[in-house]
């Protein structure tokens, strides 16, 4: 009979985990095929399609834009299984957010307890940030999952310095290096996990030496895997347009950089975390430090490493740049929320029923901004408002590819002769190409979509597209047949057909 309470606790944990997974999958099903296309994910999906179509020629194509190789390889595998290119990239984002929730929950369970683990996992899986970011086929959700897995492996290595956790950590770091540079935040956290090392057990010097050896193995293995990107000359080719500052440039111009980047970063952080979430995170930092100072320092270093780089380095402050900080931030929110709950529900100021009712009321008020935002996104992701510069990216700018599907259907109704040549004179061609041609590669494509064609290409174009503001003139011989205005006064797309 003594084991009965433990059995009930395990059953409750399994049911809670199952309910959390079901809710996560429900949101993914609701948005994966409904969220508006975004230009970056169409670029990445094009990389994956090229690898799928001719792996020998295009294995390193993502390096042409200095993007991670691993997502294009995994995406190619999903495309080979019959999944549409953009959907393949979105499924990788879903997997990344799921991995972040699982590893973040396990990490917090190890450091602070079961309640903290479940709540952290729930905030990551169901919170506003990844509701949006995991709906788009960009690399940041995947990078976040890999960072969370790497930090979890680092903690395991500090508590048990052996070869298996070192090899696991090395593989995760390598996968991260082949996904996005922001994953190397895990390498910054690694030495701080020594705060969890057992300094009281016998043979301290031997065990510390073992940790240093195994940590070096992990870092070397991770670097070796990530160095696969150096196998192509594309790695050293400079970008035509840089999107990052160097750290030296940021520090030399610290004042202007902070004035430029802080307002959009705060708008995005307070919008996705919500103001109640920000308050709870600040409280969580204090409570976490009182309960387990070493663990709080690890979470704090993790948060600061990401947030400082997100603040100083980008030329344009997009919310995705602090994605990998959302795991420790969610952890602090969870600790703060549970502290408030316990302070209200576990006190002695009133009867138990009154205390619990008051705690539920406070929780409902704290959740209201997030619930209202998520309800709007789930109801109409195309016209919802998003925090920070995400609203520009996903709604108003020409990076929001909301016109692609209706334009593709209109072009398809126009029929042949094939191939149909389409000149995207202003705008981005990848989304329309993917919608019209799918995974079809090379000369088998029925639609030839190109950007700002040369005179010979433009001469045979049947359709011409002008997307966004600017004085680009329409070539002679074309007539306007359809236009699409993005919401909130956003960019207008115009479709022309040769007369």
Image (spheres, rainbow, N blue to C red):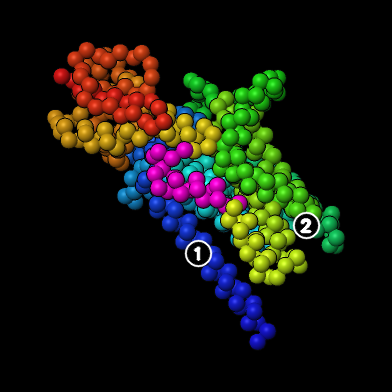
Q: Position of residue 444 (x, y in %)?
A: 23, 36
Labelled disc at residue 28: none
Residue density around tag 2, few if under 14, some if 14–19, many if 20 or more, within 10 Å = few
Residue at x 44%, y 53% (from the top left corner): 27
- Quarter that holds the C terminus: top left
In the image, 321 versus 283, the foreground residue is 283
Q: Which residue is mark 1?
A: 19
Q: Residue 72 appears in which quarter of the rendering? A: top left
The span shown in magenta is: 366-385
Left or right: where 88 falls relative to 374: left
The image quadrant that residue 176 belongs to is top right
Distance in Å between CA atoms under marks 1 and 2: 29 Å
Q: Nearer the viewer, residue 187 or 6?
A: 6
- Residue 246 position within the rendered picture, expressed as x and y whole percent measured from the top left: 63, 24
Q: Residue at x 72, y 49 (%)?
A: 283
Residue placed under numbered mark 2 in the picture: 291
Tell me residue 483's x, y (percent).
Answer: 28, 27
Count numbered badges in the picture: 2
Decide: is 433 above or below 241.
below
Which secondary structure, mark 2? helix
Examine the structure image and report whether residue 469 is included in the region drawn in magenta: no
Q: Is residue 263 visible?
A: yes
Question: At 50% from the left edge and 21% from the top edge, which residue is drawn?
Answer: 241
């Amino acid at each position: 009979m003594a084991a009965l309470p433990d059995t009930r606790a395990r059953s409750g944990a399994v049911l809670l985990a199952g309910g959390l997974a079901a809710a996560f999958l429900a949101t993914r099903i609701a948005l994966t095929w409904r969220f508006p296309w975004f230009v970056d994910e169409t670029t990445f999906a094009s990389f994956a399609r090229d690898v799928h179509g001719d792996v020998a020629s295009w294995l390193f194509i993502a390096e042409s834009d200095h993007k991670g190789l691993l997502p294009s390889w995994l995406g190619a595998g999903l495309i080979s299984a019959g999944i549409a290119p953009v959907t393949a990239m979105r499924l990788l984002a879903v997997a990344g957010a799921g991995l972040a929730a699982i590893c973040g929950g396990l990490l917090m369970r190890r450091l602070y307890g079961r309640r903290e683990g479940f709540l952290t996992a729930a905030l990551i899986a169901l919170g506003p940030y990844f509701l949006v970011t995991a709906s788009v086929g960009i690399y940041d959700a995947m990078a976040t999952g890999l960072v969370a897995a790497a930090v979890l492996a680092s903690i395991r290595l500090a508590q048990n310095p052996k070869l298996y956790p070192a090899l696991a950590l090395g593989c995760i770091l390598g996968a991260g290096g082949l996904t996005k540079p922001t994953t190397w935040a895990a390498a910054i956290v690694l030495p701080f996990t020594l705060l969890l090392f057992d300094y009281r057990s016998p043979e301290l010097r031997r065990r510390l030496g073992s940790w240093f050896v195994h940590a070096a193995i992990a870092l070397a293995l991770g670097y070796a895997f990530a160095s696969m990107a150096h196998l192509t000359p594309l790695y050293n080719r400079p970008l035509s347009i840089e999107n990052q500052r160097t750290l030296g440039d940021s520090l030399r111009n610290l004042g202007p950089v902070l004035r430029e980047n802080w307002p959009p970063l705060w708008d995005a952080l307070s919008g996705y975390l919500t103001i109640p979430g920000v308050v709870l995170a600040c409280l969580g930092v204090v409570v976490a430090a009182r309960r387990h100072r070493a663990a709080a320092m690890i979470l704090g270093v993790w948060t600061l490493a990401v947030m400082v780089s997100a603040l100083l380095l980008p030329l344009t402050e997009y919310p995705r740049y602090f994605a990998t900080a959302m795991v420790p931030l969610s952890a602090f929110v969870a600790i703060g929320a549970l502290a408030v709950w316990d302070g209200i529900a576990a006190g002695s100021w009133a009867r138990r029923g009154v205390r619990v009712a008051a705690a539920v009321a406070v929780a409902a008020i704290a959740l209201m901004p997030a619930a209202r935002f998520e309800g709007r996104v789930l109801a109409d992701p195309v016209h919802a408002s998003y925090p920070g510069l995400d609203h520009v990216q996903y709604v108003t700018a020409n990076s929001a590819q909301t016109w692609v599907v209706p334009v593709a259907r209109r072009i398809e109704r126009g029929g042949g002769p094939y191939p149909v040549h389409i000149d995207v004179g202003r705008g981005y061609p990848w989304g329309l190409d993917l919608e019209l041609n799918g995974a079809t590669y090379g000369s088998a494509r029925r639609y030839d979509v190109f950007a700002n064609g040369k005179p010979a290409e433009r001469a045979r174009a049947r359709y011409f597209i002008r997307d966004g503001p600017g004085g680009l003139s329409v070539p002679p011989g074309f007539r306007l047949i359809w236009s699409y205005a993005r919401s909130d006064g956003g960019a207008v797309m115009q479709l022309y057909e040769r007369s």
